[in-house]
């Protein structure tokens, strides 16, 4: 049984009708659904395959990177929306968010050198990061 879907359904029924929350309740319900599904999946993987998934690397650091990205892109949007058209400000803020997230993941050292080397052009990226004394 998918507990995430059940939680989403229940939260949708509770949150969406509240006038102050409205359709935003559906977004919060989706977040709750994915958090529950993620948590159950991690527990099952750890039990079934005896995986060692450090919470710091797989949860804490990505959450910090996400928070940094969200804050930076939000402020970028606020600055740009007063200067240029809102649609263009949104597009530029999203591009900025992707760049900031990538930089945050690198600075927080979410990936090891070996993991970076596995991606396309990983050796070059690793060399640059070493020269910059990040790794």
Image (cartoon, helix red, strand yellow):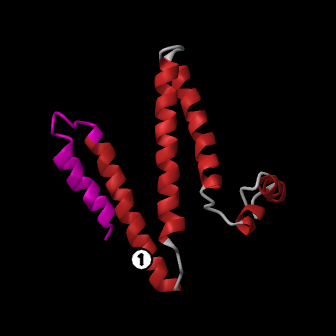
Quadrant the N terminus occupies: bottom left
Reading the image, the residue beneath label 1 is 43
127 is within the stretch colored magenta: no
Who is closer to the viewer here, 99 or 40? 99
Instruction: Determine the residue located farthest toward the front in the rendered image.
Output: 133
Q: Is residue 47 above or below residue 83?
A: below
In the structure shown, which secondary structural element does the residue marked by tag 1 occupy? Answer: helix
Q: Residue at x 25, y 54 (%)?
A: 9
Q: Residue at x 51, y 35 (%)?
A: 73
Q: Position of residue 24 (x, y in %)?
A: 29, 39
Where, by quadrant of the figure, is residue 8 drawn?
A: bottom left
For residue 76, side relative to residue 12 (left or right):
right
- Which segment is the magenta one? 1-24
20 is within the stretch colored magenta: yes
Q: Residue at x 34, y 57 (%)?
A: 33
Q: Position of residue 89 (x, y in %)?
A: 53, 23
Who is closer to the viewer here, 122 or 67? 67
Quadrant the C terminus occupies: bottom right
């Amino acid at each position: 049984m998918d507990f995430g879907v059940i939680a989403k359904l229940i939260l949708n029924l509770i949150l969406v009708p509240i006038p102050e929350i409205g359709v935003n309740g559906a977004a919060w319900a989706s977040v709750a659904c994915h958090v529950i599904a993620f948590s159950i999946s991690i527990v099952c993987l750890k039990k079934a395959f005896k995986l060692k998934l450090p919470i710091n690397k797989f949860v804490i650091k990505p959450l910090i990177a996400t928070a940094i990205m969200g804050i930076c892109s939000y402020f970028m949007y606020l600055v740009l929306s007063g200067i240029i058209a809102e649609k263009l400000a949104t597009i530029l803020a999203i591009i900025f968010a992707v760049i900031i997230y990538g930089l945050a993941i690198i600075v927080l050292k979410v990936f090891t050198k070996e993991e970076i080397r596995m991606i396309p052009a990983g050796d070059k990226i690793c060399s640059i990061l070493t020269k910059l004394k990040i790794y």
